[in-house]
Image (cartoon, grey):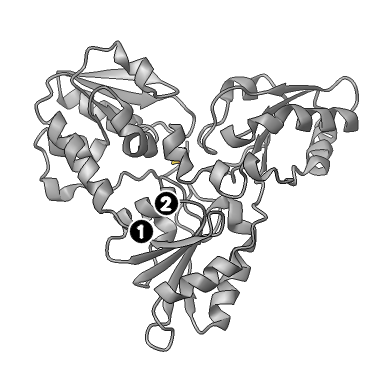
Amino acid sequence: MSQDAYSEGDLRNTGMSLRHDREWDYELDRIIDEIEERDATKVGLQFPEGLKRRGPAVADDLRELCDDDVTFLLSGQPCYGACDLDTYLMRRTDVFVHFGHSPMKESDKIIYVPLFSNVDPYPIMEESLEELDDPDENPDVGLVTTAQHMNLFEDMCEWLEERGYEVHTRRGDDRLTHEGQVLGCNYASADIDADQVLYVGGGKFHPLGLAMEHPDKNVVIADPVNNVVTIADTEKFLKQRYGAVHRAMDADKWGVIFCTKIGQGRWEIAEKIIEENDNAYLITMDEVTPDRLRNFNMDAFVNTGCPRITTDDGPRFHKPMLTPGEYEIAVGNKPLEDLEFDTFHGTW
Ligand code: SF4
């Protein structure tokens, strides 16, 4: 995804940003224990984009703690989520350490090191109370957050309860590790019995999807990194999506993108489109970027991979880029009112 998209809330802006130059707990002792337990000699290390710069130093620290025969290999592949494991490196190592995201699917070989934010969320949560209903009138509130703040989730629930709220939480589905966790493509943890939801986390990246997915709920954003409280507003986003759908309505030739990243494949959806449309061509790729698509002579694209590529980076592609649901509208199978946020369920 683009720099712009991420400035709205990836690790770089969720308290993990290098500009803050924080120290993270890389859980080196746990990693060393696992290496020794498995007699591993090849260890893969994968960092999200915002923390790649730290990779060599972490490898150095691990080398010092290990026997000389252990080799550490750094993944240079882009990484935006636990859906995005470097499977090439994983196959060639005895232990594979994935930093910065919570597990999407456990495996004996993978060690997930979540890297929790150390930003204090309570001052901004205090401010966010002004945007929530008075608990004497409406005590029901949902609470969700991202993996980076998950270590404080129970404390945050208690904090709200102490202020008179009845906090509703749930673990969405098996794409999510924790109760109350949301991803940029999955807001099932907000399917709770409350008409207001407090999202604690960086940027507008996640809560916008949350508000689209739950239009009946007031989504209050308490952003402890940028220190602001806002209400998620979907209007601008919807306009952008309607614009893309309209531009694609005249398309003859469609490029249907099937993403080969381990946790981003939606084969049935891609297959259904090409089976039903003789002018649709399946294109497989890992990173979906404007440059990689430029040479295909298509009128429009439909992306079955990460939904945020479509919604956040959509305007950067030379031809309209739609979600599978938007494609159905553009080809006339569904009415415009059916436009909704593209969410992703399940693992692999
Ligand atoms: S598919 Fe979901 S988890 Fe993966 S990068 Fe996209 S939004 Fe994040």
Q: Amino acid at mark 1?
A: Ala
Q: Are marks 1 and 2 in contact (CB under 8 Å)?
A: yes
Residue 170 visible in the displayed image: no
Give above or below for 99 relative to 316. Answer: below
What residue is at 29 percent from the left and 32 percent from the top?
A: 315
- For residue 204, the mark is 2
Q: Amino acid at mark 2?
A: Lys
Q: Position of residue 134 (x, y in %)?
A: 41, 83
Residue 223 visible in the displayed image: yes
Q: Is residue 42 left or right of residue 291?
A: right
Residue 276 occupies which quadrant of the picture? top left
What residue is at 30 percent from the left and 25 percent from the top?
A: 317
- Dot 1 falls on a residue whose secondary structure is loop
* Closer to us: 316 or 144: 316
Q: Is residue 211 left or right of residue 226?
A: left
Give above or below for 45 relative to 232. Answer: above
- Dot 2 falls on a residue whose secondary structure is loop
Of pointers 1 and 2, the one earlier in the residue sequence: 2
Q: Position of residue 100 (x, y in %)?
A: 62, 42
Q: Which residue is mark 1?
A: 232
In three-dimensional space, the C-alpha distance between marks 1 and 2, rounded to whole angstroms, equals 7 Å
What residue is at 47 percent from the left and 41 percent from the top?
A: 7
Q: Quadrant of ligand 1?
A: top left
Q: Position of residue 307 (x, y in %)?
A: 36, 38
Q: Which corner quadrant holds the N terminus? A: top left
Q: Position of residue 69 (x, y in %)?
A: 87, 19
